[in-house]
Each structure stands twice: as C-alpha cells, then as structure tokens.
Amino acid sequence: MALQYKFKELLDFPCDQHLRIIVLNDDSQPQRLVDHINKLMSGATDIDSILDSRQSANGKYISYTLRVRFTSAEQMEMLYDKLPKLEFVKHLL
C-alpha cells in the first residue's frame, strides 16, 4: 500500500506522537476511545491514558489529547484513516 502521508520522511520510527481527537461529548468516551485505538492497533503500540481534555464552548464536543507509540508509518497512516470513520469521532489532529 502506498502511503498517502509523508510520515516516513518526517519521522523516525518507532516514535511517540500526541494525538488530539475531537469526539461527541459523552461520559463513556475516554475509555471507549482508548479501547477503539487499542483494537485498531492490535496491541502493537503503547497508549498512555488521556493527557488532557477540553470541552467545546457549547458543550457538544470534547477533545482528548493522548500519546501513542507508533512502530511504523503504515501503522500511523492506518490509524489516521480508520479512526475518523468511527461514528463518535469528529476530527483527528
């Protein structure tokens, strides 16, 4: 699979990256989000707990910052491709 992003050129793997993920505001979201990432990554990575969270001005969304250890550019691209397709995820930065 050809990579769409230039992760290989910009980063040395394995590497830790902070991700900001914007989701619908729901009490179960933090653990649900970590569980989905673990499922997508198949246990091949290390995910820290939520480092930071911020609620939107209207309270409809919440953003979570977490640190993820990626072992390859392909793994990183797969997460950037699949995570935003989940119904409760609005954006991945």
Image: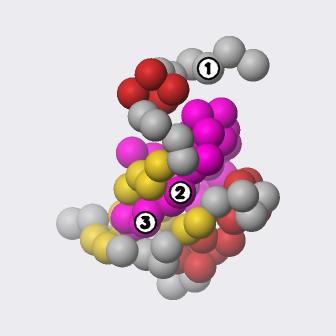
- Mark 1, Cα crowd under 10 Å, few <14 / some 14-19 / many 20+, is few
The residue pinned by badge 1 equals 3
Label 3–label 2 contact, CB within 8 A: no
- Secondary structure under tag 3 reads strand
Residue at point 69%, 65% (across, down) = 38
The residue pinned by badge 2 equals 69
Tag 1: amino acid: Leu
Q: Nearer the viewer, mark 2 or mark 1?
A: 2
Picture quadrant of residue 66: bottom left
Q: CA distance from mark 1 to mark 3?
A: 23 Å
In the image, is residue 46 above or below residue 72? below
- Secondary structure under tag 2 reads strand
Q: How many marks?
A: 3
Picture quadrant of residue 33: bottom right
Q: CA distance from mark 2 to mark 1?
A: 19 Å
x then y, percent, for residue 71: 61, 47
Tag 2: amino acid: Arg
- Secondary structure under tag 1 reads loop
In the image, is residue 53 above or below residue 56? below
- Mark 3, Cα crowd under 10 Å, few <14 / some 14-19 / many 20+, is some
Disc on the earlier residue, 1 or 3? 1
Q: Is residue 70 magenta?
A: yes
Q: CA distance from mark 3 to mark 2?
A: 10 Å
Tag 3: amino acid: Leu
In the rendered image, the residue lying farthest to the left is 57
In the image, is residue 51 above or below residue 70? below
- Depth check: give the residue in front, 11 or 68: 11
Residue at point 42%, 34% (across, down) = 11
Span colored in magenta: 64-93
Disc on the earlier residue, 2 or 1? 1
x then y, percent, for residue 50: 43, 75
The residue pinned by badge 3 equals 66
